[in-house]
Image: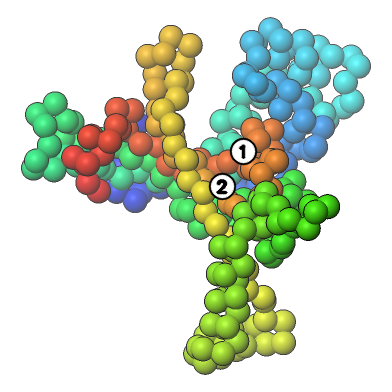
Amino acid sequence: MRETSLTAGHPVGIGNVDEVEDAQNNIYWPFDNVDQYNLAKFLCYPKIKSNGIIRRSGVESQCSWMKPGSGFKTVNDFKNRLSLLEQVGGEWFVAPLKATEQAYAWVPKVRQFYFKDTMAVLKDLIGDPKLAPYMKWYPEKLYDESNRRVYTDLSTGDWWWRLQVKLFFLCANGKEQIKNEVNAKYGDSAPSVTIIPLILTSDKTHLSHSGKKKAWPVFMTVGNITERVRFSEQMNSLRAIGFLPPHAGTDLMMDLQC
């Protein structure tokens, strides 16, 4: 993340054309393959390793046992690839948050707010092949050995059942215009109706060991992902969609407006 004086809604940047095409054709981008991707996970989880460990464990020229192409050329090569991760799921935009007339005197007049196109992030999330085995696209009812209802994921709840039925009848009976538009676009291969519950979460976090650098990220995931991996760091099932001002407490956010 970097400060910028760009106008509201202006993209911070998405890299060059070659990088964008690589991201579309390679599911492990900005890494070259699954081995390099898994190595990067090891070097980053639960926190990024020191330059010495990265050099001894991740740089091919320092690791004679490593399969060619599965490591990194240099430490900088590894870190440069990490810096490209922010482009996954769409570019970052910036907009100003302005203090209202009723704001306290200590409230900054203007703060920067970074955000992504939520729909682009959503498409990237539900299209992630690594998450495909853990996706639920239809409601289900589970029972234990005593025939008692069991509730686990969102798809097992009554809410999903009720909403699924409503959408089915809306598309099948109630709205001729919707049916005609869907049939005109898809013909006999018209898609079925499903639910994608959006789950948002936010919490202030430290960006440095000293604690002086802070941010308030906003994350998004979907209720279709099973509870077992929905908030797993290793599965990357929680995606950043925005960064609030560092001091964005409740009082401050009430005094700021886009």
Q: Is 153 located above or below residue 108 in the figure?
A: below
- Residue 146 pos. (x, y %): 80, 54
Q: How is the image coloured?
A: rainbow
Residue at far front of view: 146
Frontmost residue, 13 versus 54: 54
- Horizontal side of 21 relative to 240 (left or right) equals right
At 67% from the left edge and 17% from the top edge, which residue is drawn? Answer: 75
At 33% from the left edge and 40% from the top edge, which residue is drawn? Answer: 113
Residue 110 in sight here:
yes
Q: Tag 2's secondary structure?
A: strand
Tell me the residue that label 2 is attached to: 221
> Which quarter of the picture shows residue 248?
top left
- Horizontal side of 98 relative to 195 (left or right) equals left
- Residue 126 pos. (x, y %): 64, 55
> Which quarter of the picture shows residue 92?
top left
Q: Is 2 located above or below residue 136 in the figure?
A: above
Cβ–Cβ below 8 Å for labels 1 and 2?
A: yes
Mark 2 is on which residue type?
Thr
Q: Tag 1's secondary structure?
A: loop
- Residue 80 pos. (x, y %): 60, 27
Which image quadrant: the N terminus? top left
Tell me the residue that label 1 is attached to: 231
Mark 1 is on which residue type?
Phe
Give the CA distance from mark 1 to mark 2: 8 Å
